Amino acid sequence: MAIAALNSAATGLRALSTRIDVVANNLANAETTAFKRQRANFEDLMYLTLKQPGAQNASGELAPAGIFVGLGVRISNTQLDLEQGSMENTGRPFDVAISGQGFFRVKVDPNVGDGLAYTRNGNLFVNNENELVLGMGDGYKIDPPIQIPSDATEVNISEAGQVTVLRPGQIEKQTVGQLQLYQFVNPNGLTIVGGSLYQETDSSGAAIESKPNENGAGKLLQNFLEGSNVDPVKELVTLIKTQRAFELNSQSIQTADQALQTIGNLRRM
């Protein structure tokens, strides 16, 4: 059985090593705009059945419990924590945060998935074609597209996503576009592609389009950005717990090795 202990402890070391990688990535992105932390979930592996519950003994009595020896652990999935991050006032008119559920949609390389991706990062810019783009990566264009007139003296984005501008010589503001939000039945099924971008999968379900403040979608806050939802204190506590568990699995390997050495020495006695 010492061999089984070695294998079980080895699976524990592998799983805990992955968890350390996940926590390290969370901490590295503690200041990344709209970053969503991940949690590594574990599940036990198959069991070796040495005795079935309810087995009869020689007297015909039923065993109240069986004997099962587990064969280790593995990472079942890494789960997105979609809790909203703190709102940071930037004072910049093209910074937009989502207060509530939903994602912005942007156009990415058509060779990547279906050419569309989703993000909660509202750090927007205006490119050389006067289009609203995401201020990261290659400047992904907002979808549906919105153009800001080059002579606009004031840009306003309402809580409902309506984009209006004030142009020279005008008194009333002109509507130039509408920011839409997208929700998913299972947002944990999204594929993470980096750069605060996510892509739709069969598991996530199709994107559900709606205006901000409607159908459960959040409202938009101009002059704000959503911060990372990583809590460094919690991550450090998780890291310490993982380190202790890693040490215990290492100790299990040492103990199993000593047991095997003892068994091997019996032949020399």
Image (tube, rainbow, N blue to C red):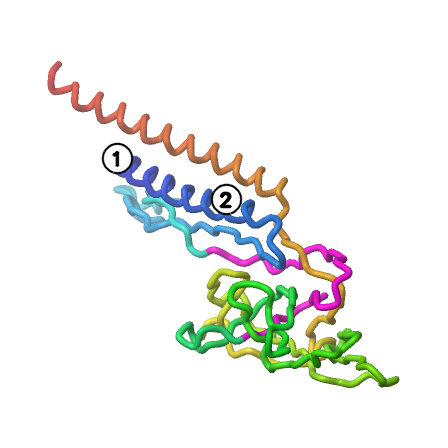
Please say if 71 is above or below 125. Answer: above
What residue is disc 2 on?
A: 24
Local SS, label 2? helix
For residue 136, which quarter of the picture? bottom right
Packing grade of label 1 (10 A; few <14, some 14-19, many >=20) is few
**Foreground disc of the pair 2, 1:** 2
Name the side, left or right, on which 91 lies relative to 83: right
Please say if 197 is above or below 231. Answer: below
Q: Which mark is residue 190?
A: none
In the image shown, does 28 or 185 lie closer to the viewer? 28
Name the side, left or right, on which 154 lies relative to 70: right
- Is residue 213 visible from the viewing direction of this image? yes
- Identify the residue at image location x=60%, y=53%: 32
- Name the spot of residue 96 as percent of width and height, x first: 70, 67
Which region is colored magenta?
78-106
Q: Amino acid at mark 2?
A: Ala
